[in-house]
């Protein structure tokens, strides 16, 4: 199942009644890091309202683009934002802006799409409340997606088993990671299904070129094979 071809994520089969004992998800944890936390996601559309005027007399109108710029600044300043050195804070991406018709017209309406990612230090509801408070009275907020963050206990049996198998196969202790991205892991966790997230060496996500190292992929296949064999033994022994 792939979200790109049939528009369904990994968790879609849960709706069909399938309940796995554990989920192995190769959708996070670059180069065999194991993900302990995935950020939550809030996508929202902002619509800024202004008043038309001729571009030669902008003081007769209200520029919706400037209203939007101010709102975006207020929203960004409401968070301590993630950086390359400290990626675990809230991140904010302005993905799309649409507004304005001509050089000489003051625009009266602008829309903007924004993507915010957050760790369990904030809930999605708290993020949305902050956005509404910061946007201002001339900007409407429409939340399109709100997905909670995901976390797993590093001492859980499922994580410790994966650490054990990966160390044997790769000859190193895997790094435990906070992922800036998101996956369907939270949908399994909401049904109390353990999730282990790691993936092979790859890069260029949602970009050109997007690539995957084949040797690393075979390593992951063999790691999964060993993991499943040992997991089955744990079940038989009363896990």
Image: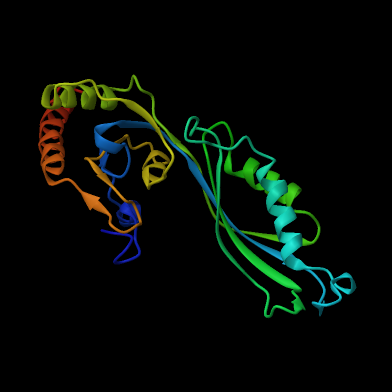
> What residue is shown at x 23% (from left), y 52% (from top)?
211
> What residue is shown at x 19% (from left), y 23% (from top)?
238
Q: Quadrant of the C terminus?
A: top left
Q: Is residue 224 shown left or right of residue 153?
A: left
- Is residue 42 in view from this perspective? yes
Q: Quadrant of the N terminus?
A: bottom left
The residue lying furthest to the right in this view is 60
Q: Is residue 109 shown left or right of residue 32?
A: right
> What residue is shown at x 31% (from left), y 52% (from top)?
10
Is residue 87 positioned above or below 52 on the image? Answer: above
Q: Quadrant of residue 136?
A: bottom right
Say which of 124 and 56 sits in front. 56
Percent x, y of residue 14: 33, 51
Q: Is residue 117 shown left or right of residue 172?
A: right
Is residue 117 positioned above or below 166 on the image? Answer: below
- Color theme of the render: rainbow
Say which of 12 and 30 sits in front. 30
Percent x, y of residue 91: 54, 42
- Is residue 239 in view from this perspective? no
Percent x, y of residue 201: 22, 40
Q: How many marks?
A: 0
Q: Is residue 9 shown left or right of residue 135?
A: left
Q: Quadrant of residue 218?
A: top left
Say which of 239 and 125 sits in front. 125
> What residue is shown at x 68% (from left), y 52% (from top)?
72
The residue lying furthest to the front in this view is 56
């Amino acid at each position: 199942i792939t979200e790109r071809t049939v528009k369904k994520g990994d968790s879609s089969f849960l709706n069909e009644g399938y309940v796995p004992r554990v989920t192995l998800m190769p959708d996070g944890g670059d180069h065999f890091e194991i993900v302990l936390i995935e950020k939550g996601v809030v996508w929202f559309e902002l619509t800024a309202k202004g008043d038309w005027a001729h571009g030669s007399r902008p003081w007769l109108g209200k520029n919706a683009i400037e209203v939007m710029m101010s709102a975006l600044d207020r929203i960004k300043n409401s968070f301590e934002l993630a950086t390359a050195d400290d990626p675990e804070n809230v991140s904010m991406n302005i993905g799309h802006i649409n507004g304005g018709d001509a050089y000489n017209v003051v625009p009266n309406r602008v829309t903007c799409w924004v993507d915010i990612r957050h760790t369990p230090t904030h809930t999605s509801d708290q993020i949305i409340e902050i956005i509404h408070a910061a946007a201002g009275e001339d900007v409407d907020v429409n939340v399109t997606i709100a997905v909670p963050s995901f976390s797993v206990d590093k001492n859980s049996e499922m994580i410790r088993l994966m650490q054990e198998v990966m160390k044997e196969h790769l000859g190193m202790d895997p790094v435990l990671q906070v992922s800036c991205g998101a996956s369907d892991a939270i949908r399994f966790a909401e049904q109390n299904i353990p999730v282990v997230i790691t993936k092979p060496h790859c890069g260029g996500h949602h970009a050109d070129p997007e690539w995957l190292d084949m040797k690393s992929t075979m390593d992951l296949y063999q790691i999964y094979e060993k993991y499943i064999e040992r997991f089955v033994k744990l079940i038989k022994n009363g896990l």
